[in-house]
Image (tube, rainbow, N blue to C red):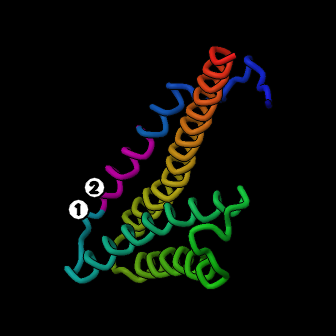
Amino acid sequence: MQTYPSNISIQRDTRAWQVQVWISFGLAVFLCATGLGWLPGQALDRAFMVMGYVFCLSAAFVLAKFVRDSQRGHALSAGDTPMWKLVVWGGFFTAMALTGWGLLRMEISETYKAFLGVSWLFLISSAFTLAKTLRDRHEADIAEARLQGRREARAESREAE
């Protein structure tokens, strides 16, 4: 029978950190939506930029998950292959490059380009931070459930003796 220490602690992010991460992400989404909503120019340019921002955002979440899984040694779980690695990294860099190219080629003021560029990079940065925070919480929940299950199993085995 294997024994486990009873003083195991599971590290969690503070409530203040979680609130700050969600506020940052919400603010980034709001700033991007505001910039894109008031974007001057042709409808096709505006549609391209909205698609680019959405593509970048989803690619950032996929990349964050892929990198985290790879670091944990789960790279081959769930069918990850070298081709999938290429798709994930290629998709992220393609999304970033095409969105940046679209932003640079738009015929709008440099001030507006700067606002869109900074809010876009803030969105990507906060998306990575949010993905990490959510994943950390999920892993802490799993560790806590496992620890609770072990404690219950120990208690049951003591009662059986």
Residue 31 image point, x, y percent: 35, 52
Compared with 37, 142 (above or below) is above
Which secondary structure lies at badge 1? helix
x 26%, y 77%: residue = 47
Q: State whether residue 135 is above or below residue 117.
A: above
Q: What stretch is highlighted in magenta?
A: 23-35
The amino acid type, in three-letter code, at marker 2 is Thr
Q: Which residue appears farthest toward the left when viewing the image?
A: 43
* Kind of residue indicated by mark 1: Gly
Residue visible at 49% across and 39% down in the picture: 21
Residue 136 is covered by the magenta coloring: no
Q: Mark 1 points at which residue?
A: 37
Q: Does the magenta stretch include residue 26?
A: yes
Q: Do the residues labelled 2 and 1 touch (CB within 8 Å)?
A: yes
- Seen from the viewer's position, the closer of residues 153 and 133 is 153
Main SS category, magenta section: helix
Residue 34 shown left or right of residue 22 in the figure? left
Q: Residue at x 61, y 35 (%)?
A: 146
106 is higher (above) or lower (below) than 63: below
Identify residue for label 2: 34
